[in-house]
Amino acid sequence: MAITKRAASDPRARIGPLVFGTGGPGLSGVNHVAKADQHLSPEILRRFDIIGFDQRGVARSSPAVCSNSLLAQQPSPVPADEVGYAQRISFNHRLYDNCRAHTGPLFDHVDTGSVAHDVDALRAALGERRISFYGVSYGTLLGQAYAERFPDRVRAMALDSVMDHSVGTATFLRDQAAGVEDSFDEFVAWCGRTGSCALHGRDVGALYDNLMRRAETGALVDPGRGAGLSWFDLSRGTFGYLYGPDWPGLAGWLDTLDRSTSPSAEGAWKAPEAGTAPSAPAPGPPVTDEVTQHPFPVFCQDWSLPVDNHAELARYLDMSRDTAPHLRVSVGAVVPTMFCAGWDGRVHNPQHRLRVRTSVPLLLINSRNDPATPHRWAMNVADQLGGKGRLVSYEGAGHGAYLRTPCTVGHVDRYLIDRRLPSVGAACRAAAPPVQPAVASRDASSAPPAGPTWSGARS
């Protein structure tokens, strides 16, 4: 297991180790600690040794890898009919076999529960009786797993942007669809009150719905490439902008798409499936059969989210569309769910309600309008923890709450350093969103920002 340490900048004030649980799944903890000043406050860096590691199956720790040539053949995660669904399942089975062959036996043992045992081995190697832990996004699942299995070895644990590991397929898809739609609604409200928004004064919801209809008929073009976008591409690109959030960028991108003209038939572009940026050209087959790390085996071994046929998938997609009438789905939910449709391995770490018996309560923090880990999940986890959890709500948008404002930093730092809990119902006001000069449109040749790590870029 690849491990790195950034020593406390003030050795005389050092408290001990703080293990950094990165998101994804599939992001490198070693890389995150190399840029720790972007993820943790100066006071935390002064008081703690920051410990990062690449968990099993990731980056420098025997990564789970698959053939690029096969990944380039991915069918749609939202097939239109039973034939398309069968093609997706067939692809998944070929992918599982391919990745097992390239990765070896570890492929079937990369679940988060197993990683929690690795963290405790790391604790022992450090010579520490207890550790402090900060986890963000998918890293909150690791924190929960460690607290359940090793409650007496937790000094303090802060979980930012919280996964709820108790939900089934319908709730998983519906809750995330509700979260991304709520985040979009916040963008629409901001645009309505902000003169610099490229869509200010227009009915943004109606404009977006029209873009969706154009995408469905093949009439939506990305001027940056002169090629068409599917409705799923539009939803994915929007999700990427909401992650930050980058509301000015989203407004400019949508304005540019609205001004675009229909692509020619020969220029029409099919959606790049999961694993590519939303407005990048669809990948062609690579020249050689090189391999790439992929996070899906972690997810498939942590979650049982069955989708047994196209009729069932269609019901879930209809439910998501009812929940998210503008964006229709959460790509961050649909893509991993469909990577695991037909999963033929064990789910070593299946969903369940939390059972935590730590001596110190856990601190949870979550954005109210998070597009990826909805605030509802943080509330659910706080409820499961009972007296062993305390939630701070950041009353704003975006994924990741800790470094948003002095208020959010203060709550997390006081807890990690002094183990002082905030009051019940603690909340922090939203920071003012970024404002850019008013523009007529944005150059769509620059791709929307990538969203979750299924496109390899986010925590």
Image (tube, rainbow, N blue to C red):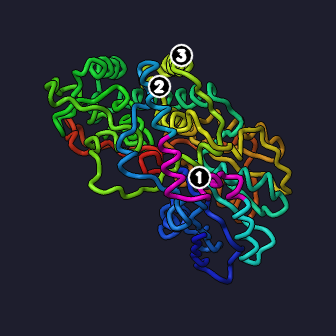
**Residue at the spot of label 1:** 136
Residue appearing at x 71%, y 74% in the figure: 16
**Mark 1 residue crowding within 10 angstroms, few (<14) / some (14–19) / many (20+):** many
Q: Which of the 4 image quarters holds residue 61?
A: bottom right
Relative image position of residue 248 (x, y in whole percent): 32, 39
Q: Can I make out residue 198 in this image? A: yes
Is 301 rendered above or below residue 169? Answer: below
Question: Disc 2 to disc 1, how far (Cα)?
Answer: 33 Å
Instruction: Give the residue type that dot 3 points to.
Output: Ala
**Residue at the disc numbered 3:** 311
Q: Nearer the viewer, mark 2 or mark 1?
A: 2
Q: Quadrant of the N terminus?
A: bottom right
Q: Is residue 325 above or below residue 457?
A: above
In the rendered structure, which segment of residues is drawn in magenta?
94-116
Q: Is residue 113 magenta?
A: yes
- Give the vertical position of 426 relative to 317 (above or below): below
Instruction: Tell me the crowding category of disc 2: few under 14, some 14 to 19, or many 20 or more residues within 10 angstroms, Cα based.
Output: many
Asked which secondary structure carries label 1, the reply is: strand
Looking at the picture, tell me which residue is in the foreground, 457 or 438: 457
Give the CA distance from mark 1 to mark 3: 35 Å
Residue nearest the observer in this picture, 81 or 260: 81
Question: Residue 72 placed where, x, y %?
Answer: 35, 44
Tag 2 residue = 85
Density class for disc 3 (Cα within 10 Å; few <14, some 14-19, many ≥20) is few
Q: Dividing the picture into quarters, in which one does residue 46 lie?
A: bottom right
Nearer-N-terminus badge (1/3): 1
Mark 2 or 1, nearer chain start: 2
Residue drawn at the location 57% of the way across and 74% of the way down:
4
